[in-house]
Each structure stands twice: as C-alpha cells, then as structure tokens.
Amino acid sequence: MTQKFTILFDLDGTLVDTAPDLMKAHNYVMKKFGYKTKTTDEIRAIVGKGARTLIGRSIWGQAKKEFSKIEDQNVKDEMVKEFIDYYGKNIINESKLVNGVEEFLKWCSSKKISMGVCTN
C-alpha cells in the first residue's frame, strides 16, 4: 500500500511574511481611533488568531485601562471591520514569500504530496 502525505500550512509567517502589510493595516486603525502605532517587529510579536485578537492584543498590551474604556462593542467591531477592510485592499503591497517556500512547495508537488492552507 502506498503511503500518501498531506501537508497543511498556516499562511501568515509560514508561507508568506505578511507582517509589513498587517502593520500598515493595524496602524491605520490605531491612528483612526487614537491609539499608538506599532513597528513591524512589534506586530510580529502579537499577530495570530485573527484580526479581533490582533487589535485586542495591541490595545491590551498598550494599556489595560484603555481597552476597558471601550465599553461600546460597536466601536470594537468597527475597529476590526476597518482593519479587515484596509488589509483586504492592501494585502499584497509588501507581503513576500518566506525564503525557501517556493522551492519547498515545488519539491512537495514533485513528490505528489497534497498541500493545503489553513488561515484565519
């Protein structure tokens, strides 16, 4: 019996370095709502688990009191919506394949390894 393999990849940071575009979307929202912006390295440290978590971690990490001041769930939802809208329109401006990914994907393909991407 032939053994078959499948590899599932995360997108952000595994296949593609999206941190520069995530940073721009994040900073757009933070400026619009009056919060401090972050560097690309700071974004890399807090990214993961989706847009709502990124925005929450950013504000929470900046000042726990500030996050608790946003009592209106509509404001939180609007921040996330703004982030997703901006990021969706600017997702490939500076994002690049992680070094070695293209070669690895070609190798997997040549070995008939099934591949998929799971991302949020």
Image (spheres, helix red, strand yellow):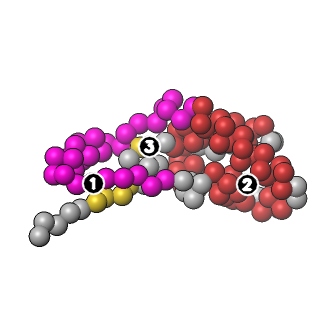
The x, y position of residue 72, in whole percent, is 88, 55
Residue 64, given in percent of the width and then of the height, sits at: 77, 62
Tell me the quadrant of the picture where the N terminus can be found: bottom left
Q: Is residue 81 above or below residue 3?
A: above
- Residue ID at (51%, 29%): 93
Cα separation, mark 3 vs mark 2, equals 23 Å
Q: Position of residue 77 (x, y in %)?
A: 77, 50
The number of numbered discs placed on residues in the rendered structure image is: 3
Q: On screen, 107 above or below 73?
A: above
Q: What SS does tag 1 mark?
A: strand
The residue carrying pointer 2 sits among few (fewer than 14), some (14 to 19) or many (20 or more) residues within 10 Å by Cα, namely: some
Which residue is the site of mark 3? 17
* Disc on the earlier residue, 3 or 2: 3
Question: Nearer the observer, disc 3 or disc 2?
Answer: 3
Specify the amino acid type for callout 3: Asp
State the separation of the CA atoms marked 1 and 2: 39 Å
Q: Which residue is mark 1?
A: 114
Indicate the amino acid at tag 1: Ser
For label 2, the residue is 59
The magenta span reads: 90-119
Q: Secondary structure at mark 2?
A: helix
Q: Give the residue at x 38% y 47%.
A: 15
